[in-house]
Image: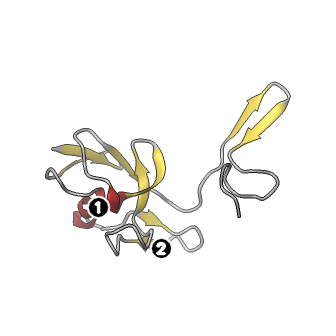
Amino acid sequence: MTLTIDGQPVSAEPGDSVAAVLLRLDPPFSRTTPVSGSPRTPYCMMGVCFECLASVDGVASTQTCLVQVREGMRVERQHGRRVLTMVMSQDTAVSDVDSLNGMPRGVSP
């Protein structure tokens, strides 16, 4: 089966995790760190370390070690800091970050 990673077609076997496919690439990384930009590689392969985060079919910060590949899947490696989006609705700005606690909406400290 074929999926795309960073816009390039990549072959995978049914049952492969997305992280396993990322590890077979050169260079083998799923994201870069927000501070130094250094590449991070999937490590534990069981959803504990969060080093395998990537965007899968438009969903950012997906734990790729927990997702099996599908035909036509789109994967984008994440680079650096997350970009927050603002949606303007007439006179009100809406953000995906809660203004009271600075956490993503729906997440409590």
The quarter holding residue 73 reads top left
Q: Position of residue 100 (x, y in %)?
A: 82, 54
Q: Nearer the viewer, residue 76 or 98?
A: 98
Counting every numbered tag in the picture gives: 2
Q: Residue at x 32, y 54 (%)?
A: 67
For the residues labelled 2 and 1, the Cα–Cα distance comes to 16 Å
* Badge 2 density bin: few <14, some 14–19, many ≥20, Cα 10 Å: few
Of the 4 image quadrants, the one containing the C terminus is bottom right
Identify the mark nearer the N-term, 2 or 1.
1
Q: Is residue 39 left or right of residue 9?
A: right
The quarter holding residue 66 reads bottom left
Q: Position of residue 68 (x, y in %)?
A: 26, 52
Q: Is residue 96 left or right of residue 15?
A: right
Q: Residue at x 69, y 59 (%)?
A: 108
Instruction: Say which residue label 2 marks.
Output: 38
| Residue at the top extreme, as displayed | 90
Q: Position of residue 29 (x, y in %)?
A: 36, 67
Q: Is residue 39 above or below residue 68?
A: below
Q: Residue at x 22, y 65 (%)?
A: 24
Query: Label for residue 22?
Result: 1
Q: Is residue 63 above or below residue 27?
A: above
Q: Nearer the viewer, residue 107 or 37?
A: 107
* Badge 1 density bin: few <14, some 14–19, many ≥20, Cα 10 Å: many
Query: Label for residue 33?
Result: none
Element type where label 1 sits in the image: helix
Q: Closer to us: mark 2 or mark 1?
A: 1
Q: Residue at x 75, y 38 (%)?
A: 94
Q: What kind of residue is marked 2?
A: Ser
Q: Nearer the viewer, residue 107 or 54?
A: 107
- Find out whether the residues at labels 2 and 1 contact each other: C-beta distance under 8 Å: no
Element type where label 2 sits in the image: loop
Q: What kind of residue is marked 1?
A: Leu
